[in-house]
Structures are given as structure tokens and as C-alpha cells.
Image (cartoon, helix red, strand yellow):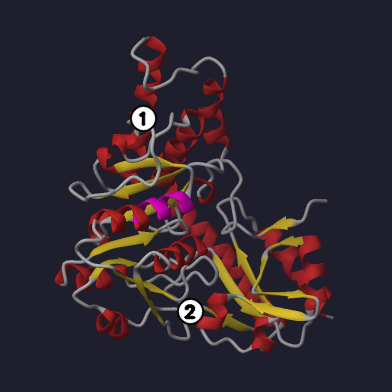
């Protein structure tokens, strides 16, 4: 038997409807959307339809969507592209201590290239300290980049409040929404963001495709150079096959959002309730309510690294700490939240999906109970 899959925050399987939508683009619809003949025109229509499908999900104009290879590239384009284009206005960026490496590593790179970065701390739930964020703003601050929802603990950030702070100080605001798009309502106008990153493989589309929302009027400098595809911002022949998949996944997410939220939350809560019943001293990481409906990050007490190794043979999930040559490496997110090392060693992130069943949850709890014993 295959292990029970409870790692949907890491990646998702391709939805059957997405797969069906992609199949014709493997052979019969192979045109280059930059070509002016019939094959190219068909590809161009497909490209623009996918742009429309994404824009409808996040409530923006289709011409504000740029296709990328995924969340990492979207974050790189947003942060580097904006700061390079606007460095004469200032060289200061504000982010948080719990961002994904696709943001943290970009900021570290910019630090080596004349930019100053403020890393704002979070509280015990993983929520960004807003007074500290506001205090960090200087006359040189040109960009704030804070994730919408954390990939490890699921905590949802107060994006609307941060956007108010950004607007008040005339600062551009980017959010990495790779974990939130398709799991909770995401409306760029309600959130008040200027740029937003999307990753296809987090929402039942293929790996290797993503999108970046850039508000009209925003100046972005190329970090890749070539022909004029994607408004000249992201050159290179578009990956039509996977863009079709991303567009279809966004259409499905919009159509089934409430149903999917309901199932993910029900399965997550069922798992949590059953684990608490078996392990009363289980500790929850992340906000108890204001988190993604599918994410459960918990600490098992008095377990060692063999618990994780054995668990992952039967349940696909993610660890909060890794042990290499007797050295324990703690997740930067758990470090930022001040989770004690002894607890972090027994931390597991379970993340449910729209396909998760109650049968899988019950079986997972039995497996965990036997392993802990």
C-alpha cells in the first residue's frame, strides 16, 4: 500500500479535470503564441483564456497577470524587478522572519547588492508584529513583502492591515500567496496588495508553472532578457501546456472553493481531535483559528528522530526539524516562533487536501498511535 498522503502544502496531485484540459496541448495544439498563423493564433487564444481564468480567481484585470515557472520565480520577479526598477527612490525592504526561502534568499541577495532589509519578528502564533513593522519604516523604504499564509504552520497574516500601513506610507506591497490561493478566498483588491505570487503545483496544477499579479502602473525591471513575451516583463516562449493546467486549476478552485474548504477543514479538525484524544499533551503550532483550513502543525512530546523516519514510511507529512549526524536543525519558522528544541524535534506538519477522506484520517491516527507506543 502507498503511504497516506497528508502533505498537500508541499505539493498536490494534478486534478483529473486539469489533466483532461492539458491533454490536447501535448500533440494537436502545439503552436507558438507569438506566431501570426492559425496555430499561433489558437495558442494565443488559449494563453489569454488562462490569464482570464486566473484573474477571475483573484479579482484583477487579465492584463495584470504574468506567467512564470512557479512561486519562486514569481517572488524573484516581484522583489528584484521592483527594487531594481525603483532603487533611486530608496534601498530599504521590509519582510518577516518566517518567509519562504524564495523570499528570504532573494532578500539576502539584495543585501549583498546595496539594499537594507528589516526582518520583522512574529509572535507565538506566527503573526507578524505590526507595531514593529510600522516602526521599521524609513524614508528609504520602497517595498514590504509579507506572505499571505505560512507554509509550515498555516497562520494567515493580517494582510489588509499591512496594506493600510503600506498605502499610508506610499510603499509598494507584495505578498507570496503560494499557500493561500485555492485554499481560502484571495482578492487582490480586498487585500490591498500591489503584487501577488501564485504557484501552480500547490493548487492541483502541474509543477513548473505559476503566475505573478502586478498592479497596472507598477514599474518592474526585467531580471531575464530576451524577446517581448508577457508584456516584455518575462521573456521566453510561454509554456502553453502547463499554463492551460494552471488556468483550469484556477477555474476549478473558484467553482469549488467553499466545498474544498469544508472538506479540508473537516478532515484537518478530525485528525486534530483524534490525536488530542490519544495524546492529551499534544501542542498545536500556529494560530488556533486564523490559519489555513488544511494545515495542522503539532508537537509530539518525548519522541526521537526514529519516530519521524518510521512515520514517513506510512504517512507522507513534513517534519519541523531534521537530524543530521546528531545535529538537530530546527525549522526557521519554529525558531522564529520560539518553539523549544525538545518540542520541535517531535513536530510534524500534516496538511489535508480536497481529496482527503475520513478513512485516511482514521488510518493515519492508528499508525501514529502505534509508532508512539
Most common secondary structure along the magenta stretch: helix
- Residue occupying the point 25% across, 56% down: 194
Of labels 2 and 1, earlier in sequence is: 1
Q: Is residue 291 visible?
A: yes
Q: Which one is in front, 219 or 69?
A: 219
| Marks 2 and 1, how far apart at CA | 48 Å
Where in the figure is residue 223, as x and y percent of width and height? 38, 47
Answer with left or right where residue 264 lies relative to residue 48. Answer: right
Residue 77 part of the magenta segment: yes
Q: Which mark is residue 227?
A: 1
Q: Position of residue 371 (x, y in %)?
A: 82, 74
Q: Is residue 261 above or below residue 200?
A: below
User: Is residue 349 found inside the magenta-colored segment of the image?
Assistant: no
Which sits in the foreground, 113 or 281? 113
Work out whether residue 280 can be spotted.
no
Q: Is residue 95 left or right of residue 272?
A: left
Q: Give the image quarter of residue 20.
A: top right
Residue 75: numbered disc: none
Q: What number of labels is visible?
A: 2
Q: Which stretch did the figure color magenta? A: 71-78
User: Toward which corner of the image does residue 65 lie, by quadrant?
Assistant: top left
**Residue indicated by mark 2:** 288
Quick check: marks 2 and 1 in contact, CB under 8 Å? no
Residue 153 lies left or right of residue 109; in this view the side is right
Residue at 31% of width from left, 85% of height from top? 132
Q: Residue at x 78, y 68 (%)?
A: 311
Mark 2 vs mark 1: give the one in front.
1
Amino acid at each position: 500500500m502507498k503511504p497516506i498522503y497528508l502533505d498537500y502544502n508541499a505539493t498536490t496531485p494534478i486534478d483529473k479535470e486539469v489533466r483532461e484540459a492539458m491533454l490536447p496541448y501535448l500533440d494537436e495544439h502545439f503552436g507558438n503564441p507569438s506566431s501570426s498563423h492559425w496555430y499561433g493564433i489558437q495558442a494565443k487564444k488559449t494563453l489569454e483564456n488562462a490569464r482570464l481564468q486566473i484573474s477571475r480567481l483573484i479579482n484583477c484585470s487579465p492584463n495584470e497577470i504574468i506567467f512564470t515557472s512557479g512561486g519562486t520565480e514569481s517572488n524573484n520577479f516581484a522583489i528584484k524587478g521592483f527594487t531594481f526598477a525603483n532603487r533611486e527612490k530608496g534601498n530599504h525592504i521590509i519582510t518577516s522572519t518566517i518567509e519562504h526561502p524564495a523570499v528570504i534568499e532573494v532578500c539576502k541577495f539584495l543585501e549583498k547588492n546595496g539594499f537594507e532589509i528589516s526582518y520583522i519578528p512574529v509572535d507565538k502564533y506566527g503573526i507578524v508584529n505590526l507595531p514593529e513593522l510600522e516602526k521599521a519604516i524609513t524614508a528609504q523604504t520602497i517595498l514590504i513583502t509579507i506572505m499571505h499564509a505560512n507554509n509550515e504552520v498555516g497562520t494567515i497574516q493580517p494582510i489588509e492591515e499591512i496594506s493600510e500601513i503600506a498605502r499610508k506610507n506610499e510603499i509598494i506591497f507584495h505578498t507570496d500567496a503560494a499557500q493561500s490561493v485555492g485554499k481560502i478566498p484571495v482578492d487582490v483588491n480586498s487585500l490591498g496588495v500591489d503584487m501577488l505570487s501564485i504557484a501552480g503545483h500547490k493548487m492541483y496544477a502541474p509543477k513548473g508553472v505559476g503566475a505573478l499579479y502586478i498592479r497596472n502602473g507598477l514599474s518592474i525591471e526585467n531580471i531575464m532578457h530576451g524577446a517581448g513575451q508577457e508584456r516584455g516583463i518575462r521573456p521566453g516562449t510561454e509554456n502553453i501546456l502547463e499554463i492551460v493546467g494552471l488556468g483550469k486549476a484556477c477555474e476549478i478552485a473558484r467553482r469549488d472553493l467553499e466545498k474544498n474548504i469544508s472538506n479540508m477543514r473537516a478532515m484537518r479538525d478530525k485528525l486534530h481531535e483524534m490525536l488530542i484524544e490519544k495524546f492529551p499533551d499534544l501542542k498545536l503550532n500556529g494560530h488556533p483559528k486564523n490559519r489555513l483550513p488544511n494545515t495542522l502543525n503539532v508537537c509530539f512530546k518525548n519522541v526521537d528522530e526514529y519516530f519521524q523516519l518510521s512515520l514517513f514510511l506510512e504517512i507522507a507529512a513534513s517534519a519541523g526539524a531534521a537530524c543530521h549526524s546528531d545535529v538537530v536543525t530546527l525549522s526557521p519558522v519554529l525558531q522564529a516562533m520560539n518553539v523549544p528544541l525538545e518540542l520541535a524535534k517531535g513536530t510534524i506538519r500534516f496538511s489535508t487536501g480536497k481529496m482527503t477522506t475520513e478513512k485516511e484520517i482514521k488510518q493515519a491516527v492508528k499508525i501514529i498511535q502505534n509508532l508512539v507506543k
